Amino acid sequence: MELVAKITLLFAGWGAIAGVLSGFLRGMPTDQGSLALLAIFFFLFYIPYKLAPNILKFSPEEFPGGKWTGWTAFKRGFSGFFIMWLVLWIMTYTILVS
């Protein structure tokens, strides 16, 4: 499997975790739920960005484009992370509310 595909799957997995946690927090009757959602979203996006070279065992120079930076992580991983986060957040919240 290509490195970019592995990175996308890594971010999508962390997005799924973030979505489930966000769904549970949004289902709680607190005023701080929205702020907690935002914090979880950004924190759990930051974790795979920092851990990707170690988990997938690649050096930053091996990445297509020659450099692993925050911007390249955003371009390669955000779409998978966001889609998984959104779908699982909506599903978890809907199950908790019903």
Image: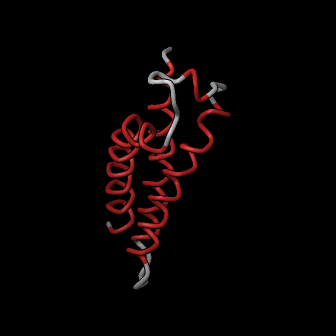
Nearest the viewer among 79 and 69 is: 69
Residue 89 position within the rendered picture, expressed as x and y whole percent measured from the top left: 37, 56
* Image coords of residue 82 (percent x, y): 35, 47
**79 vs 39: above or below:** above
In the rendering, at what x and y percent does residue 26 appear?
Answer: 40, 70
Q: Position of residue 1 (x, y in %)?
A: 50, 14
The structure's colour scheme is secondary structure
Is residue 32 or residue 97 the one in the foreground? 32
Of residues 27 and 59, the one drawn nearer to the viewer in this rendering = 59
Left of 68 or right of it: where is 72? left
Residue ID at (40%, 71%): 27
Quadrant where the image shows the C terminus = bottom left
State how many labels appear. 0
Farthest residue in the bottom direction? Answer: 31
- Residue at 50% of width from left, 40% of height from top? 69
The answer to whether residue 53 is above or below residue 84 is above
Residue projecting furthest to the top: 1
| The quarter of the displayed image where residue 57 is located | top right
Q: Residue at x 33, y 40 (%)?
A: 79
Q: Residue at x 32, y 61 (%)?
A: 94
